[in-house]
Each structure stands twice: as C-alpha cells, then as structure tokens.
Image (cartoon, rainbow, N blue to C red):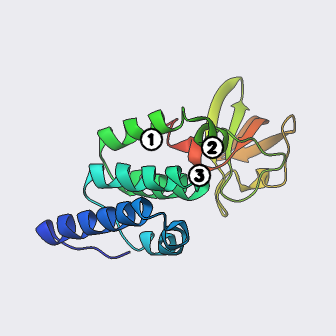
Amino acid sequence: RLSLVGSEMCIRDRFIEHHLMALYKNKKKDDIAQFYPHLKEYVFDNVNSIKNIFNVYLLVDMYVEALDFLYSQVEVGISQELRDFYYQASMNKEIGNLVHKQYDVIETGSYVMVDIDGQKDYLEILLCSQYDILIGKRPGDSIDIELFNHSQHVEVLAIFNKYLSLIHI
C-alpha cells in the first residue's frame, strides 16, 4: 500500500474521491469498476473521502467492492467515526447480507462463533494457530483441543466471513 504524508495524502484522498464522483455523475460505471483495484493500493486518511468512495460503489450496485473497500480502510485505521460508519453500513440490506452471510464449512480466514467450555466466543481461524484444527468443521461439530496441558471442548455454532469480525471487536 502506498503511504503519503500530511497534505499530500489529503489532496490524494480528495482527488480520488472527486474523480470517482465525477465518473458516477457522468454514468461511467465501467470506469468506476476498472478503478476499483487501484483503491487497494491506498490507505485513506480522510474519513469523509472513505465514506463518499464507499457510497459511489454502493450507488453503482458494486456491493462487494464497496464493503471490501470500507473493511480494508477500517481494518488499518483507528477512527471510531469510521468504525461507527461501518456498523451503520451493515444495516443496509445488501451490505448486511454480505456481513452476516453464514457458511457451511470453516476455511482459513473464517470468523467462527464457537462455544468453548460453555462460553460463547468468536475466533478468526488462521493457519498455524491454536484453532486451525477447526478447518473443515461444520456448524454443530465439536472437538476437544489440548492447549498448554489443558483440554478445551469447542463446538462450532456458526461460520462467518471477515466482515463480521469488525462488528464484534
């Protein structure tokens, strides 16, 4: 990802935001779609620019891209305003369906609701983590895991994607 400092970043953020808004105003949906991969190169500093870019992608019915862009910006930032916006965006029907989508099988990167020894918790399943043994499990499956000379009984309750994790942090 590219990183700029101070006023250069603000100018860049606004330029990209206004460029996308102009494309939308001129009904250039294909150009907006083609620009999307370039957004991943940047960490935006301006919360309003992030919100407006997200909304442009919503307006052209690119819900996955809109959510993925917003997720990537919230994940690397510390703005409570942006986290609040992410939560509000998850109330949008199309975005909410993506955020709350449930899956049948745990894969690397899944965000999983589990019951560990009677306590409900959420886990991100990563390779080489203590819970990677859950990869391939389904809701309702359970397993006993030995951790540091202590056995834990883990039951899989539900399987989600990364997008839900920002709501539960």
Mark nearest the camera among 2 and 1 is: 1
Mark 1 Cα shell of 10 Å, populated few (<14), some (14-19), many (≥20): many
> Which amino acid, by three-letter code, is at mark 1?
Tyr
Q: Are marks 3 and 1 in contact (CB under 8 Å)?
A: no
Q: Secondary structure at mark 2?
A: strand
Mark 2 vs mark 3, CA separation in Å: 25 Å
> Mark 1 sits on what residue?
86
Residue 18, position as x, y percentages in the image: 30, 63
> Mark 3 sits on what residue?
63
**Which of the 4 image quarters holds residue 119?**
top right
Q: Are marks 2 and 1 in contact (CB under 8 Å)?
A: no
Residue 2, position as x, y percentages in the image: 33, 76
Q: Residue at x 67, y 63 (%)?
A: 127
Mark 2 vs mark 1, CA separation in Å: 20 Å
Residue 143, position as x, y percentages in the image: 83, 41
Q: Secondary structure at mark 1?
A: helix
Mark 2 Cα shell of 10 Å, populated few (<14), some (14-19), many (≥20): some
Which numbered disc flags the more N-terminal residue, 2 or 1? 1
> Mark 2 sits on what residue?
123
Q: Secondary structure at mark 3?
A: helix
Mark 3 Cα shell of 10 Å, populated few (<14), some (14-19), many (≥20): some
Q: Residue at x 18, y 68 (%)?
A: 11
Q: Residue at x 52, y 50 (%)?
A: 58
- Count of residue discs: 3
Which numbered disc flags the more N-terminal residue, 2 or 3? 3
Q: Is residue 30 left or right of residue 107?
A: left
Q: Depth check: 85 or 112 in front?
A: 85
Q: Identify whether 127 is placed above or below 93.
A: below
